Image (cartoon, rainbow, N blue to C red):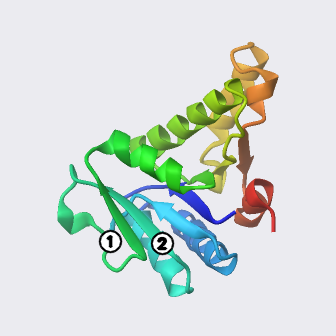
Amino acid sequence: MKSVAVYLGATMPRNPIYVEAVRTLGKALAERGITLVFGGSREGTMTVLADTVLGNGGRAVGVFTKILPKNLLYPGLTETIVTENLAERKATMLARADAVIGLPGSFGTWDEFFDALEQAKTDVINRRKPKPLGLLNVNGFYDGVQALFQKSIEEGFTSSRTAKLLTISDSVEGLLDALIGD
């Protein structure tokens, strides 16, 4: 496992527990020698993650889109890729990553993560090995998604084959171990 796409917010949350989880993940990625692939913004938790990864000697690849103001681009990344639009950004991030992690966030975070989850489902249908996907359930943030996912399985909308695609964990180390091992 060489790289992980991380979807997270471009805003700063009210509760510092989320920022601490982002720092913990950034440090763990750097320590494991895993390259961060993220949205490339210097705003909110995205900048906290990039700061932490780079500050601990890690590598950070930003995938930024032309539709956002250039002043939001995080400076000094290991590599910066600029895409034409959000769809291209999502595809590029997935192509550059060996695994995917969703942190607490909003519309963009959810859109990117669920797009990656659908890609993994398509891989399973086409008998290709899907990328490992996981949500970091900080402070119960994704409890509702976990309940929705379970309901979807119970009602037959999500098959037992595709139910195995999503890992949800309350801890950074537990999530990384489940997705990528040591």
> Would you say 171 lies left or right of 145 here?
right
In the image, what residue occupies the spot 69% across and 29% down?
149
Residue nearest the observer in this picture, 21 or 69 = 69
Name the quadrant containing residue 148. top right
Tell me if label 1 and label 2 are in contact, CB under 8 Å: yes
x and y percentages locating residue 80 in the rendered image: 35, 67
Which secondary structure, mark 1? loop
* Residue 82 seen: yes
Residue nearest the observer in this picture, 20 or 80 = 80
Image depth: mark 1 or mark 2 in front = 2
Could you give the CA–CA distance between mark 1 and mark 2, rounded to whole angstroms? 10 Å
Note whether 81 is above or below 124 in the view shown. Answer: below
In the image, what residue occupies the spot 46% across and 73% down?
50
Q: Which mark is residue 74?
A: 1
Note whether 55 is above or below 135 in the view shown. Answer: below
Q: Which mark is residue 60?
A: 2
Q: Amino acid at mark 2?
A: Ala
